[in-house]
Amino acid sequence: MIIATAVEIADRRAGRLGDKYYAGRARSVMNRNFTAFKSSTWLVVLSGFIEPVLYLFAFGFGLGQFIGDVEVSNNVISYAVFIAPGLLATSAMNGAIYDSTWNVFFKMHESRLYQGMLATSLGPLDVALGEIAWALLRGLIYAIGFVAIVAPLGLIPSWWGILAIPASVLIAFGFAAIGMAITSYISSFQQMGAINLALLPMFLFSGAFYPIEVFPESAQILIKALPLHHGVSLIRGLTLGEIDISLLGHAGYFVIMIALGLFFTTKRLTALFMR
Amino acid sequence: MTTNLIQAHGLTKRYGDFVAVAGIDFHVAKGESFGLLGPNGAGKSSTMRIIAATSQRTGGDIKILDKDPNLHGPQIRAHLGVVPQQDNLDTELTVEQNLFVYGRYFGLSSSFIKNKIEELLDFAQLVEKRDVKVDALSGGMKRRLTIARALISEPDILMLDEPTTGLDPQARHILWDRLFRLKEQGVTLVITTHYMDEAEQLCDRLVVMDKGKIMAEDSPAGLIKTYSTKEVLEVRFGSERNAEMSEKLKQHCERIEVLPDRILMYADDAEKVLEEIIKQGIHPITSLVRRSSLEDVFLRLTGRSLIE
């Protein structure tokens, strides 16, 4: 067998569209993350999975006892059924943001990992895609785990609910792409703290725990502009089996987030490490 | 294809108003060990980044293996092994994993990388450390691993930016020995350094850079021959008297440099100069006869020391 050299491998892609930015090897970046993951502590991994489950038990079953049933678009459902999709969307957001902000910030500024990657025949888009794809793979596993727990408890009334798994990966993709783009513009830990500050109100007010109709019209418009509201609405529509055209709108919001996030991340990585 | 792996004409790099590289010409031939010598801020690292296709030039021309780095970044980087000034090893991984993962970035097959790792661990004297995480390595080991990592893709050109800065003398000598072996195997080396002993040890040919410009270009011996005398007499009279004494000493040597702490007297026979001044009744506190080095060349070219 003839073994291809690094030069032959790189030359195969020469002349293709975007060959300056993409070498077609985002998977080698994922391979790196998998290798690091194998030797990391499982506690960190487990915590990402356990968080939404704890919320579900505390609020869905604990607080839910006092709240009783809720009425959503002429459907009467238990409070746990109401918040389960909200928690799935929220945990997709949190996981993706954690991976794409703190992790990326560390690799960019502390361990200088990306400089090392970009000294090879990889391009900046390989790095961005590889990092995001890894975050999504983790998100996928968390989503499957969550659905596997809540479905037997009867918290996903509709079979459409199975689509909540790919939907939460889409949500994670959107947040990861934007998170990585924002992180690439940030240069200090203090600024990183501001990201968390923006996430908390979104978590509390986006309709995960109660319908946003409780707020005045003007506040609702603001909430509807934020991404988590679209994530919660998308997944809730699927788990409750309320399928209509608005779900496509919610999904479209995340498609735009992904496109913008990838564009700015690649642009910024190029500016930072290729200037 | 020409035998020059790197060919630059009028190469320029500006960052806003600041000119880091001010229109330099140089070439690097296959199998050669080429050095960029100069103080910090001379433009060496900027030049290295342009060669490594991780920085876009703002003027002039450069071809690396006949390709333009502004247009063919990944294709050029496939030919290069890069050892950066600051270690950027993957601290979450072990020594062996670092090499494997890096090889995968180039798209190399697992079987190729696995064989190569055995060879490189041996070369870098890290066989026993293969399962150790990078954080537990000494500075010298980390550097050797970084060099091994850069060699995983069997590069045509190995780029070393200040390879021994921050290492203790013993670790430096081990590293030089490893680099010398690579040189013997015919690997083309491009090295930046502000240590003249390093440049003399490793470089066949070098350019002396200062403020973004090339001041001189030759072999280390050639540079010393052109810009300095064979030997140097270093004398000290205490910092207050150095300036006053230099007037009296001038006539005894070819050239004189007065530094804050000592006077350098350039002559082909420095021992004789020392005898002469003692005969004149001039008694320095200390005196030292040594051979000229690249430090003297740099002093002559720029009026400044390399390490400030």
Image: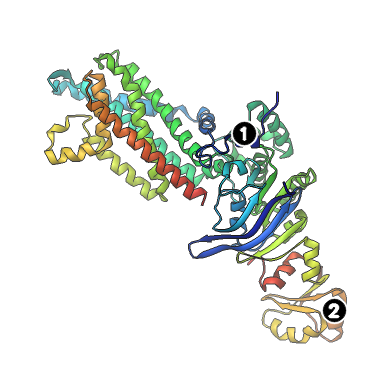
Does residue B68 appear left or right of residue A140 in this picture? right
Q: In the rendering, at what x and y percent does residue B130 appear?
A: 65, 33
Residue on which the image places disc 2: B273
Q: Residues within 10 Å of mark 2 (few under 14, many from 20)?
A: many
Q: Residue at x 63, y 31 (%)?
A: B108
Q: Dot 2 falls on which chain?
A: B
Q: In the rendering, at what x and y percent does residue A117 appear?
A: 55, 40
Q: Dot 1 falls on which chain?
A: A
User: Does residue B38 show up?
Assistant: yes
- Residue A265 falls in which quadrant of the image? top left
Q: Residue at x 24, y 15 (%)?
A: A157
**Mark seen at residue B27:** none
Q: Residues within 10 Å of mark 1 (few under 14, many from 20)?
A: some
Residues A120 and B150: in front is: A120
Residues B54 and A65: in front is: B54
Does residue A59 appear left or right of residue B224 in this picture? left
Q: In the rendering, at what x and y percent does residue B297 appear?
A: 74, 68
Residues B95 and A3: in front is: A3
Q: Looking at the image, is B85 positioned above or below residue A131?
A: below
Amino acid type at mark 2: Val
- Residue B220 falls in which quadrant of the image? bottom right
Amino acid type at mark 1: Ile
User: Does residue A97 show up?
Assistant: no
Quadrant assignment for the C terminus of chain B? bottom right
Residue on which the image places disc 1: A9
Q: In the rendering, at what x and y percent does residue A27 appear?
A: 52, 30
Does residue B192 appear left or right of residue A258 in this picture? right
Residues A39 and B108: in front is: B108
Q: Give me the C-alpha separation between circle 1 and circle 2.
A: 62 Å
